[in-house]
Amino acid sequence: ALSFLPMLLLAPVGGIIADRVNKRDVMVCLDFFTSALMLFYTLSFERLSLVPLLIAVLMLLYGIQGAYQPAVQASVPVLTAPENLMAGNGVINAVNSLAGVVGPVLGGVIFGFYGVKPILIISVICFFLSAVMEIFIHIPFEKRQKQGGIFTVAIGDMKESWSFVSRARPEILRVGLLLAVINMVFSALVIVGLPIVITRNLGFSLSAGNRLYGYAEGVLATGGLLGGLLSGVVGTKLRVSRGARLILLCTATLLPMGLVLLLPVNGMAAYLVIVCACFAMMIFSAIFSIEMITYVQKITPPTLTGKVMALLTCLVMLGSP
């Protein structure tokens, strides 16, 4: 909970910066800072008290993430043609999902053989190389004139973005609230409910349950990856007005899960049904989220994209279980 607070607070700041500063420079600076932060943690985690150090580092990392994502999301509309916008968002979602599949597996293997220190060193190197590569990315940018001091500009920008989502395009605010509710319901099911059901309620031993939940996590991440890829393929055929069908399909995946828990079904059979249903849910929810984000990017002026996407991020995070 503590680590999420900076992400919540810094996302609006990141949105303002993304609309005022070259987005490439924002990403470069934040990646260099992350590399330095991981280097500090690598050198100090065996010398300082672990829990306070870990909380402080996590708070900083989540804060960086909160400031970083608006720059990424605001860059997509200026780097892709309107007809390719959904495909671009699909690629970003697919890469994130792929990292969710590969990262824990590689981390687990390295940790099992060599401990945590090599993982930290690899993190330092990866963030440093990422920052260096980003230096060579060209993202179109038009500098805006500042009127007043930093705080005056920040307050003015926030008022402008809030007026846009609440008056000019109120459907954006409704989309944000809808995504927050979906995040609250489905994330609670996946993050809180699923591990308990698999490890405690299906009759497996503790070690078997933990192993099967690990497999389930990989399947869920693969579903998000496939949803991202599919959104790029079928993006031109999707319409926001039909988004309710995707929510209905997500909801329909709950029915087989409920039935196998209600009826006297073998534990392994119940596990397979639940995992398959969650896999389908992740596909539909990924497509729906990408569709909504793409819609918001299309109707938002370039000078407001970072702030509006940051506002959406904050609303969605408020729904995290």
Image (cartoon, helix red, strand yellow):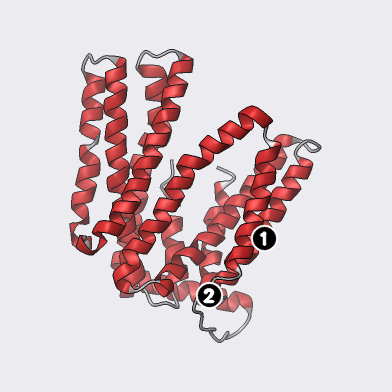
In the rendered image, is residue 258 in sight?
yes
Which residue occupies 38% across, 29% down? 194
Residue 241: image quadrant is bottom left
* Rendering coords of residue 290 (x, y %): 33, 57
Q: Amino acid at mark 2?
A: His
Which residue occupies 61% across, 74% down? 151
Residue under numbered circle 2: 138
* 226 on left or right of 3: left
Residue 279: image quadrant is top left
- Image quadrant where one finds the N terminus: top right
Residue 273: image quadrant is top left
Q: Nearer the viewer, residue 203 or 112?
A: 112
In the rendered image, is residue 172 in sight?
no
Disc 2, disc 1: CB below 8 Å? Answer: no
- Position above or below: 2 against 144: above
Disc number for residue 32 = 1
* Rendering coords of residue 135 (x, y %): 61, 69
